[in-house]
Image: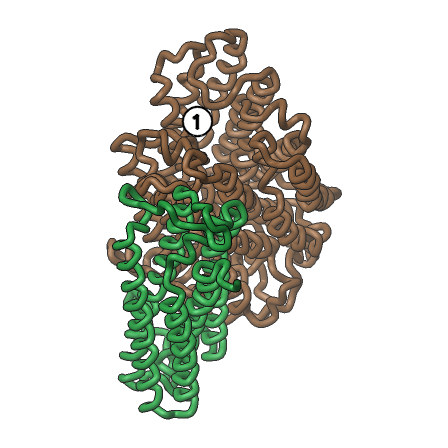
Amino acid sequence: MSTSQTGAVHSEGHNPALLHHFATEEQQKDSADLGMWVFLATEVMFFGGLFCAYLIYRGLYFGDFAAASSSIDAALGGTNTAVLICSSLTVVLAIWAAQTSRRGLMLLMLVLTMLFGCTFLGIKAVEYHDKFVEHHVPGPSFSFDHEEIPGHPGQYANPQHAEIFFALYFIMTGLHALHMIIGLGIFTWLLWAAWRGRFTPEYHTPLEIGGLYWHFVDIIWIYLFPLLYLIDRHK
Amino acid sequence: MATAMAHPDAQPIERENYLNKHYGVGSWLLTTDHKRIALLYLISITFFFFIGGFFALLIRLELLTPASDLVQADTYNKLFTMHGQIMVFFFLIPSIPAVLGNFLVPMMIGAKDLAFPRINLLSWYIYIIAGALMLHCMLTGGVDTGWTFYTPFSTAFSNTKVIEAGLAIFIAGFSSILTGLNFIVTIHRMRAPGMTWSRLPLFIWAHYATSIIQVLGTPVIAITLFLVVCERALHLGIFDPKLGGDPLLFQHLFWFYSHPAVYIMILPSMGVVTEIIACFSRKRIFGYTFVALSSIAIAVFGFLVWAHHMFVAGISVYAALIFSILSYAVAVPSAIKVFNWTATLYKGSIHYDAPMLYAFGFLGLFTIGGLTGLFLAALGIDVHVTDTYFVIAHFHYIMVGGAVMGYMGGMHFWWPKISGKLYPEGWARLAALIVFIGFNLTFFPQFVLGYMGMPRRYADYSHMPEFQVLNVLSTAGATVLGVGYLLPMIYFLWSMRYGKPAPDNPWNAAGLEWKTASPPTTFNFEEEPVVTWEAYNYEELDAPHPPRTNKEEVPVVH
């Protein structure tokens, strides 16, 4: 922010977090909340394009997608789902702790959230490594030969169509992982701000909108997990 | 600061304002003042406008003769591609929202700034990074896919810099998203006391509708271009039919954004024209509620018509029928606006100042562009004229005749507020006339050419030499149009130094932005305004018949 605009207009005695162009703290908080919701609408459409592409090809090449899907580890994916749901709980508890002036609990919950986030990324890295070893990464070394279509013994998946599945798998989970990494960056800042005592029961807007973002990234995963890992697993 | 409102008359001694409060490059590059960011955008998009215009000039020169003699066909492909990409993504999309919207939205609703000033600055930096990447792409070989990036040509066959251009537009999208996000939150949360939704200027309604499209549409083109980049870089088969992909999916995703993108360009322009017509007819806008809600209707319907770009691409007949009908439906709210503007003019006290000339130009040209859009929404005619100059003429009537006319009109209307100086009115009227004549001379022949069957995107039409006369007319018109665009740039720059100081309200216009100083102070208003009047209260303003002189100041109703 340019030095020109801070300071001069701040009147005495109000919350230093209140920016000059807002009349009240309430207006500032409402703006931040709405801003994050609008941003999440953008994100929904961003991932929406990918979900649309996924649904088209899943319809066209269902058997190949099912075969490719059964080659990724649903146990690891399921574990990651549980990890993210736990992290959403710790985010909510951190906000509750801020609202009720429990500083120690707030810091603990923020650290736990970040630990869960790191665990998720670690497990994701293991999964990517497995795919790399199995030559399931799209590209020149890709191979998916003689993989049976589940429920159709003797029928093999078309490697080209399976490659489309893996391309979508890596792009969708990769963009999701990128969002997780950005989330970890945000939570590092939140932890620092919480450590410095910036959040009070009256003012903890950054925690709330950071939490909104974190929940959103979780929800994306809640959709990604069954779509990518559980095709045709109900039999 | 206190002197600013105490002596509202224009004075030779400069009052403190947003332009002279701080000096130096740093005070501009690190500013969070929405007005300064608007000027940063103005300079940037003007730069890209002239680059895009230069490509257009080369295209028109090539088409002066039937043979492909000025440039090779390969070069020609790059020229029309980069003309389209620069003009659409680096000029038209940011034009009115990022310049006039940035400058005016907070002032019109009585706010000190946008809700997120730093995000506003960030959006400009994102735009600059994207623009630099696009320039680098152009200077190191360019791209030849057409602005539409159709697959599989763009992902498997073209040997030009598709990845770089795709990434540049991907990045530019985030600048557009952040602007839209900022406007939505600002309009919801930052309105002054008394500034209810039904008292908002229609410029604000238009920008609100535009912002919805920016926020919901742009991420889809972003992810689509991201997939194109991935497919090309890693040889994936997402859109390549040879590898099992579906090129139609690309077209659906592309037009899902790129059709509503037309409304990102035209809706703000409609907002500008609404302000101008009310001011220069001295009347409240006819059918305020209808004009406001028609903006929202255009934003909503605009998302449901994209496949009319794909009637010959092999979509199902039933889908084509439905998209055809929906495309007709989107004409209804546009027509509502045109009829209401016309009704506003009826028995108005019309003043023919330069902004009004541009608004008149907009009315005529947008109507022609809109009506020919209905031709194209009709399945039978569309099959006949797809990919011909008829389509080119149609969308230039909307984008240049509509969007750019509105932008130019708005620049003239608010120039005294932006710069604090008056532009030379005589020259401005002349320029408006030149633009109108040049535009029609450029693009009307293209309707005829297209209907006769001249396809778009060809450097060579030597097998059809009878097309030359109309092409010569079009090129001549483009030259006139170029002069019409250069003139305002020259006299705007001239007026910054030599122009007469502008009074706070040179047009005696309604609207909160005219109750601030010209140019405004950094925080726009000395004290938070309280709105007690309806929008466009021209009858009230003119009631005691004050002499309409440039020195006259509108009484501030607090």
Q: Which chain is brown?
A: B
Q: Residue at x 40, y 24 (%)?
A: B57
On screen, B83 above or below A111? above
Label 1 is found on which chain of the structure? B
Q: Colour of chain A?
A: green
On screen, B36 above or below B89? below
Q: Residue at x 69, y 53 (%)?
A: B284
Looking at the rendering, which quadrant does residue A169 occupy?
bottom left
Mark 1 sits on what residue? B483
Nearer-the-camera pick, B337 or B511: B337
Q: Find residue B304 and report its horizontal and vertical position in percent.
A: 62, 47
Nearer-the-camera pick, B121 or B137: B137
Q: Disc 1 on helix, strand or loop?
A: helix
Quadrant of image for the N terminus of chain B: bottom left
Q: Find residue B182 and report its horizontal and vertical position in percent.
A: 46, 61
For this view, does B26 lie left or right of residue B188?
left
Looking at the rendering, which quadrant does residue A199 occupy?
bottom left
Residue type indicated by callout 1 = Val
Q: Find residue B499 and report its horizontal and vertical position in percent.
A: 40, 43
Nearer-the-camera pick, A187 or B555: A187
Evaluate whether residue B549 shows in this view. Answer: no
